[in-house]
Amino acid sequence: MATLDPLVTVEPSESVAVAPSANTASEAIHPSLGRLGPWQLLRNLSDGQYTRLYQARPANHGEGQPASYVIKVLRNQWWRNSEAIARQRREVWIGSHVSHPNIGPVLSAGVDGPPFYFVMPKLPGSNLAQMLDEGYRPAIPVAIWIVRQIAEGLAAVYEQTGMMHADVKPANMIVAPTGHTTLIDFGFAHSSQEASSWTDRPVVGTLNYIAPEMLTSTLAADIRSDIYSLGITLYELLTRRLPLESDDPHELVDLHRQTKPVCIREIRPTVPPTVAALVHQMLAKDPLRRPGNYGELVSQLVRLEVDLFDVR
């Protein structure tokens, strides 16, 4: 079993914002001393409700070697929580079994006992949610390309594991400087036969992208639920705003279930009618009115990419 080497409290670096918590002191990693099994932990990248991300390198590599790995560690207050552990193990299983250029792979893991963690390559690029927050507005064909890559990755996950992602949103997409986009974070992935309530997950962010059927009947959710979430992402990429917004979670649930989004062309008139039609098809309240499978969706996205290649 991997063990966490001596942990000491340090001031966070200027480039990393560490949210204060009851466990910050015990979990802080000194850049030169923090170690998790065979991995040297160099800095905290982000804090989530359940996990923390660290930039790392193999401990047997010299200090001059690049830190080209990311380690996702289950925060220690969840080490006795069976659901949190199961999510971590599910994410490892999918990342280890799915081979696709648009899906973040898992390279190694220690999830048999605490500390629960797994290792991924450090992907080049930025989190798409952060890019949008900073004003990113891609050309129309680039937005379509980003979403098409995610659709192809989702198709591979479903074909190779029978799982839906169930948390598709820009915060779980990494866009490289070249435009290559990778889907990450499969902690809430499940098959359409498994019950998984939206109340089991962090509300912030996720509810903005969740499909109506996932808010009412988990048994009705399937890959078309991920297509709905992907449609919201495309809407946001094209308009820099969400189709449905509210600070009240209960009101937001009602909006997803009952309210039709404003036509995307009213916000950005330069969006071609063919693109707008697909976006709103993906956002249909009734799953049967959305593209029926990833093959159908990808074909439509590829056709739009080609037709709109020179559109800006």
Image (cartoon, rainbow, N blue to C red):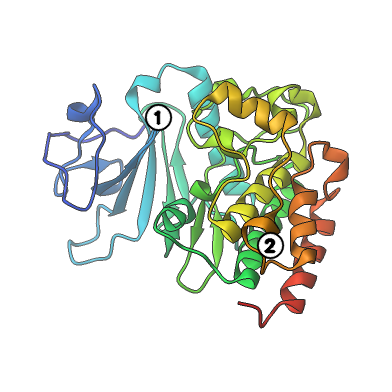
Count neighbours of disc 1 (C-alpha within 10 A) and say few if under 14, some if 14 to 19, many if 20 or more: few
Q: What element carries label 2?
A: helix
**Image quadrant where residue 311 sits:** bottom right
Q: In this view, does 200 lie to the left or right of 285?
A: left
Residue at 53% over, 40% down: 92
Give amino acid for label 2: Arg
Gap between marks 1 and 2 measured at Cα: 29 Å
Residue occupying the far bottom of the picture: 310
Query: Looking at the image, how many numbered discs can be counted on the residues?
Result: 2
Q: Please provide percent x and percent y for residue 225.
A: 73, 39
Q: In this view, does 153 lie to the left or right of 39?
A: right
Image quadrant for the N terminus? top left
Image quadrant for the C terminus? bottom right
Residue at 79% over, 42% down: 284
**Quick check: 285 above or below 265?**
above
Q: Please provide percent x and percent y for residue 22.
A: 24, 21
In the picture, the disc for residue 141 is none
Give amino acid for label 1: Gln
Q: Please provide percent x and percent y for residue 204.
A: 47, 32
The answer to which of 39 and 176 lies nearer the viewer is 176
**Quick check: 265 above or below 20?**
below
**Image quadrant where residue 100 sits:** bottom right
Q: In this view, does 192 lie to the left or right of 174?
A: right
**Which residue carries the number 2 mark?**
148
Q: Is mark 1 on a helix, strand or loop?
A: loop
Residue at 71% over, 52% down: 263
Count neighbours of disc 2 (C-alpha within 10 A) and say few if under 14, some if 14 to 19, many if 20 or more: many
